[in-house]
Structures are given as structure tokens and as C-alpha cells.
Image (cartoon, rainbow, N blue to C red):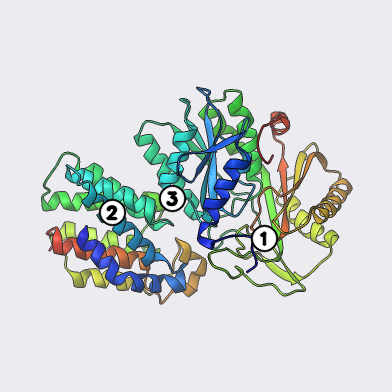
């Protein structure tokens, strides 16, 4: 979580800049507020179980991020926490299933699917790739993020712009890309 | 920006403090949260909560009290409250019979309230909800998928509030809400924009001689920008559109609401109501209840909205007329 917080901090301005033309320009700053709160919560009262770690992160993101990103990331982490249950270590297969549960949470909460220029366009191909190959690397993630650029938004704030959303990389997919890259570095997804 | 405030970032906090002290006979703030709750110690009645961005006063906290809402959540100005705050409202409203949420159709509001519902259910509180979408002026807008929820929402608060007071179940409230929502239709107009304190500049621009039809309560674009018209012409345009949206039957009965957006004087709201009632009389449409005033505003936007509610059930009118003890109904 500390690694993800650092990554978000480094990219805060970049994320907000991506959000400017197709959203309301606050995605990076909102995410930064959320991940900082999550790191603080984890450090001040360290959870006893892995499941609790994910739940604590979920609650911090839910209460501090705001907008649509808060509930979406929050639901993903809550679902992953539920999947983990009593497990303290996860096999690669279990990690894949856990990520899939997170993805399902985002889909249900956002009532969205792939191709709508949202964070799902990062989560779904990334989870599928990991499930099929047992590995992921940063360049694959970057590739999925870039693929949102020519998409026309049909969900989220950017949907209002219709055709004008084409040619902008989705900020939600970008921040999700940073999360996956952090997992590659720290949770053995490579 | 000319406003009677202290610091822009403190407007919601300071408004809540002022509101709680002013209406301490009816409401109280729940700890340090963004939740205001009705003073009520009873048990076993369904609690009704509502909320959303601030800036629409007296919505939502103005409708707290006996016969209406149990708790109201304050988001930042024009920004949805977060799920943890909505969850606090659910907890405050829960008296053992479950909690019903009245949500206006904005993407952020729906997401955050649904998330709060999941959190509450995980803790064993039964929650159900409805999403209002009475604004027929545009299908999708800046903040919503589908039609927006606006002033008509106060009738959902009022009717469900009366039912809950009588001891209706969560299921009864849901069923009635689903019947009311398709029967209410609203269109708003603006003469001048609102300024969100933290932004400091108006949300949109209108020339001195212009007005906009179909504007949303956050200043979202409407369907047409025209030269300023007189009240009769405005009434003809928006009442005409609303009327067309109903499949009218001979014995239909209506409630009519003229709602001010914040900066429009009551004098003009009454002039407009006069014009609407004349048109309805001419059409032979029966109006059984009329209301004029500022119920769901958009900070200091000048303008108003017209809401019609067709009464599918005679009980609805009784419930609307049922006396309440609230700061603003």
C-alpha cells in the first residue's frame, strides 16, 4: 500500500491533468487523498489479517476519494477482502480470482462493461491476461491504458462529451494501471 | 463573487452548525458527521433518508421531522456525499424497521448511496431505495445517466414520510415510490447562473437578455437558449412540454409546484403560477393542490422550475396534505 501511495503521489498531477479535458480535473488529487488515508490507517492500527488490510484500504478510499472513483475502488477492495477471507497467503490462481472479484465489484457498482472508456478497460484485460498466462508486466499494462485513448466514452462523466472524449486517455484506467504495476512489483504478479 | 460567507471551504460546515442551532427543537447533528437527524426516540418505524450535494436548501435537511425525513446527508456544494457519511445517516435513521433512501438520479449520488446500502446491509440493517428522475428536459446530462432528479423529489419525501409515520413497511414504501416517480415531471429555467463558493466563478454564462430552458439544479445545460421571454410565454413553453409528456385521461388530477431556484423573488413565482393555472384551466385539467416557494434551489441561480404530479392514488393527496413538523415544508 505504501508503494501504491508513492506511485499515486508521483503521478497525482498527471492523473488530474488527464481528468481535466474529460472530467472535472480532480482525479489525481482525490486518489492521493484516499491512498494517503489508507496508508495512515494501516500504519496507525496495523490490521491482524490480510482480509482486514484490504477492508481498511476499502473504507479509506470510500470515505476519502469521493466522486465515482471512491465507491468503485472501494467496492473492488471490499470484494477482494471478502474473497481473501481467512487466507493469509494466496497462490497465483487465488490472486487471479481475487482480482476478478474486484473487477466484478467495479462492473456491478458502475453498471459498466468493457469498451466504455472506464477503469474496466484496464482491469478486465489485465485480469484475463494474468489468469491465462500467470504473469503480467508493466508494458502490457501501459498498452491497455493507451487503448482507452481512441475509445468513445459511454459511461461516467466523460460520456457527456460523446465524440469529444475520443483522443483522451481515461484517468480511471490510468490510476488502475498504476495499481496493477504496483502489484507486479510487490505482490508477485510478474 | 459576492456572498455572505467566511471561508469558501467552510460553507457546508458553518451552514450545518447554523442550521442545527436554529432548528434544535426539531433536529440535531449526528456527532461530527455530515448528517443531520430528526429528534426522535421512537422504535420500529422505517427511517427515511435523503441527501446529496449542498446548495439546494431547504432540500434536504429542511424536510427533517415528524412525517417526513429521518436523516439528511450534506455533501460538499453540488457534490455527492461519500458512502461513509450516507452510512452514518442510515445508522441514525435506523429504528429497527429498516431504512429507505430517496436518491436523485445523478451518477455520483446513486453510486455513493448504493455503496452505503451495501455497508449497512453488511452490518445487518435492512435498506431499500428509489431513484427519482422527474426532470424531463434532457435525457443525459453532465452529472447523470438518464433524466435528472429535481424538485418533484419533495413529493416522494412527503408521501413516503406520511406512510412511514403510520408504520408502513420498507416494501410498501418501495412500491409506492415506484408508482409516484413516473407520474411526476419537471422542467426548469434559468435567467442567471449560480456560483459554487469554492470555485468562485459562475457555473455557466447567460447574457443579460438571455434565458435557458431545461436547466438542471447544478446549472447543467438545458435544451434551448433564447432571448428573455415574458412569464406567459415561459409558462406556455414548459407547461406545454410537460403536458405532452403525459398520456392524459379525462379524470386526471394534478398537484402543481412552482419552485424557485434561489434568486427569483416569490412575486415572480406567483406571477408564473398564475399563468400556469390559467393554461391548465383553459385545458380543463383539474388541479387539486398548488404550491409556490423555494423548495429545491440552486444556490443563487435566478429561475424556477415547474413540477406536475399526477395523482394515481387518492391517498397521495391525503399524504401530501398530512401535517408535518419540519423546518421547511
Q: Which residue is rendered at x = 71% and y = 29% of the image? A: B322
Q: Name the residue under label 3.
A: B82
Q: Residue at x 12, y 53 (%)?
A: A92
Crowd rating for badge 1 (residues with CA inside 10 Å; few <14, some 14–19, many 20+)? some
Q: Residue B3: x percent and y percent?
A: 64, 63
Residue positioned 45% across, 44% down in the render: B32
**Could you tell whether A85 is left or right of B209 in the image?**
left
* Residue at which label 1 appears: B300
The location of residue A24, given as percent across then percent down, is 47, 67
Badge count: 3
Closer to the eye: label 3 or 2:
2
Label 3, residues with CA under 10 Å away: few <14, some 14-19, many ≥20? many
The CA distance from mark 3 to mark 2 is 15 Å
Q: Which chain carries label 3?
A: B
Mark sitting on residue A38? 2
Q: In this view, does A28 lie above or below B127?
A: below
Residue mark closest to the camera, 1 vs 3: 1
Amino acid at each position: 500500500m505504501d508503494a501504491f501511495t508513492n506511485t499515486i503521489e508521483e503521478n497525482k498531477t498527471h492523473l488530474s491533468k488527464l481528468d481535466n479535458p474529460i472530467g472535472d480535473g480532480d482525479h489525481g488529487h482525490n486518489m492521493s487523498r484516499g491512498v494517503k488515508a489508507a496508508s495512515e490507517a494501516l500504519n496507525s492500527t496495523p490490521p491482524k489479517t490480510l482480509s482486514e488490510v484490504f477492508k481498511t484500504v476499502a473504507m479509506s478510499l470510500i470515505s476519502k476519494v469521493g466522486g465515482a472513483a471512491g465507491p468503485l475502488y472501494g467496492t473492488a477492495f471490499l470484494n477482494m477482502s471478502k474473497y481473501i477471507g481467512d487466507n493469509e497467503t494466496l497462490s497465483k490462481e487465488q490472486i487471479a480470482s481475487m482480482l476478478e472479484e474486484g473487477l466484478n465489484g467495479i462492473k456491478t457498482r458502475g453498471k459498466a462493461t468493457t469498451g466504455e472508456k472506464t477503469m474496466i478497460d484496464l482491469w478486465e484485460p489485465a485480469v484475463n491476461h494474468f489468469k491465462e498466462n500467470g504473469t503480467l508486466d508493466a508494458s502490457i499494462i501501459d498498452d491497455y491504458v493507451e487503448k482507452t485513448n481512441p475509445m468513445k466514452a459511454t459511461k461516467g462523466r466523460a460520456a457527456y462529451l460523446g465524440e469529444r472524449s475520443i483522443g483522451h486517455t481515461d484517468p480511471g484506467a490510468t490510476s488502475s494501471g498504476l495499481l496493477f504495476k504496483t502489484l507486479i512489483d510487490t505482490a508477485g504478479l510478474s | 463573487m459576492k456572498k455572505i460567507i467566511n471561508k469558501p471551504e467552510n460553507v457546508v460546515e458553518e451552514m450545518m452548525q447554523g442550521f442545527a442551532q436554529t432548528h434544535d427543537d426539531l433536529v440535531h447533528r449526528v456527532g461530527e458527521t455530515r448528517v443531520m437527524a430528526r429528534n426522535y426516540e421512537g422504535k420500529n418505524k422505517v427511517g427515511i433518508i435523503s441527501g446529496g450535494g449542498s446548495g439546494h436548501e431547504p432540500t434536504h435537511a429542511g424536510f427533517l421531522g415528524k412525517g417526513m425525513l429521518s436523516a439528511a446527508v450534506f455533501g460538499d456544494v453540488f457534490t455527492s456525499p461519500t458512502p461513509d457519511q450516507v452510512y452514518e445517516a442510515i445508522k441514525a435513521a435506523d429504528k429497527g424497521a429498516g431504512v429507505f433512501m430517496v436518491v436523485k438520479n445523478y451518477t455520483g449520488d446513486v453510486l455513493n448511496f448504493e455503496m452505503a446500502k451495501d455497508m449497512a446491509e453488511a452490518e445487518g440493517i435492512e435498506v431499500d431505495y428509489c431513484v427519482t428522475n422527474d426532470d424531463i428536459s434532457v435525457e443525459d446530462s453532465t452529472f447523470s445517466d438518464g433524466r435528472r432528479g429535481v424538485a418533484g423529489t419533495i413529493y416522494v419525501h412527503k408521501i413516503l414520510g406520511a406512510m412511514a409515520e403510520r408504520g408502513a413497511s420498507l416494501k410498501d414504501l418501495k412500491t409506492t415510490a415506484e408508482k409516484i416517480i413516473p407520474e411526476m415531471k419537471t422542467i426548469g429555467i434559468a435567467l442567471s447562473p449560480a456560483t459554487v463558493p469554492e470555485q468562485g466563478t459562475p457555473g455557466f454564462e447567460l447574457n443579460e437578455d438571455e434565458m435557458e430552458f431545461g436547466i438542471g439544479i447544478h446549472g447543467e445545460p438545458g435544451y434551448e437558449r433564447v432571448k428573455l421571454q415574458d412569464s406567459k410565454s415561459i409558462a406556455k413553453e414548459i407547461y406545454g412540454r410537460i403536458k405532452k409528456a403525459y398520456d392524459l385521461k379525462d379524470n386526471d388530477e394534478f398537484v402543481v409546484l412552482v419552485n424557485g431556484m434561489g434568486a427569483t423573488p416569490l412575486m415572480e413565482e406567483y406571477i408564473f403560477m398564475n399563468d400556469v393555472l390559467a393554461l391548465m384551466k383553459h385545458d380543463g385539467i383539474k388541479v387539486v393542490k398548488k404550491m409556490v416557494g423555494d423548495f429545491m434551489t440552486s444556490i443563487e441561480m435566478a429561475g424556477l422550475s415547474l413540477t406536475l404530479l399526477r395523482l394515481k392514488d387518492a391517498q397521495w393527496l391525503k399524504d401530501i396534505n398530512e401535517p408535518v413538523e419540519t423546518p421547511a415544508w
